[in-house]
Image (spheres, rainbow, N blue to C red):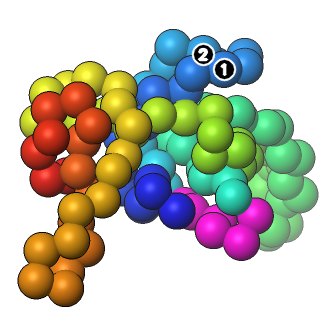
């Protein structure tokens, strides 16, 4: 998977198109990522102790990785990701500025 945990991404399709966020979780087998503040769902939580109130919590749900584009930390543009192999070590590179990510 070309997008890793901690990367900043731009959502390119769907309800959240045009919004940016940080990747907080990656699900490589499913091909999905969880982005902070994107695709929020409401979850009803029961009170845990006596006298405490129940509450509604918004939690981010995973989106498909194809709906997001990586934002290059060097040129600050949404870009595709390429790879470069140097002395047997594989590096991710930005397809726009050709710099290592």
Residue density around tag 1, few if under 14, some if 14–19, many if 20 or more, within 10 Å: few
Tag 2 residue: 17
Q: Examine the image and state in which quarter residue 52 appears.
A: bottom right
Pointer 2 with pointer 1, Cβ within 8 A = yes
Q: Which residue is mark 1?
A: 13
Residue 43 spot, x, y in % from top left: 84, 46
- CA–CA distance between discs 2 and 1? 5 Å
Residue shown at 26%/23% (left/top)? Answer: 77
List x then y, in percent, for residue 40: 71, 35
Instruction: Say which mark, if any, is on residue 26.
Output: none
Q: Residue 92: image x %, image y %? A: 27, 58
Question: Residue 53: x percent and y percent?
Answer: 81, 48
Picture layout, residue 15 above or below residue 87: above
Residue toward you, 29 or 81: 81
Residue ID at (35%, 26%) = 78
Query: Which residue occupies the foreground of this view, 79 or 45?
Result: 79
Residue 7 drawn in magenta: no
Residue 85 falls left or right of residue 87 = right
- 25 or 32: which is nearer to us? 32
Q: Residues within 10 Å of mark 2 (few under 14, many from 20)?
A: few
Query: In the image, what residue occupies the spot 79% across and 37% down?
Result: 41
Q: Is residue 27 magenta?
A: yes
Question: Magenta segment, which residues?
Answer: 25-30
Q: Left of 45 or right of it: where is 99?
A: left
Asked if one can make out residue 95 in the rendered structure from this viewpoint, the answer is yes
Label 1 element class: loop
């Amino acid at each position: 998977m070309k997008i890793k945990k901690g990367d900043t991404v731009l959502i390119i399709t769907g309800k959240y198109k045009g919004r940016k966020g940080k990747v907080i979780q990656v699900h490589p087998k499913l091909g999905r990522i969880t982005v902070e503040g994107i695709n929020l769902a409401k979850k009803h939580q029961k009170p845990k102790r006596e006298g405490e109130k129940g509450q509604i919590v918004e939690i981010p749900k995973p989106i498909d990785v194809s709906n997001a584009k990586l934002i290059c930390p060097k040129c600050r543009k949404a870009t595709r990701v390429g790879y470069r192999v140097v002395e047997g070590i594989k590096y991710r590179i930005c397809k726009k500025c050709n710099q290592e990510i």
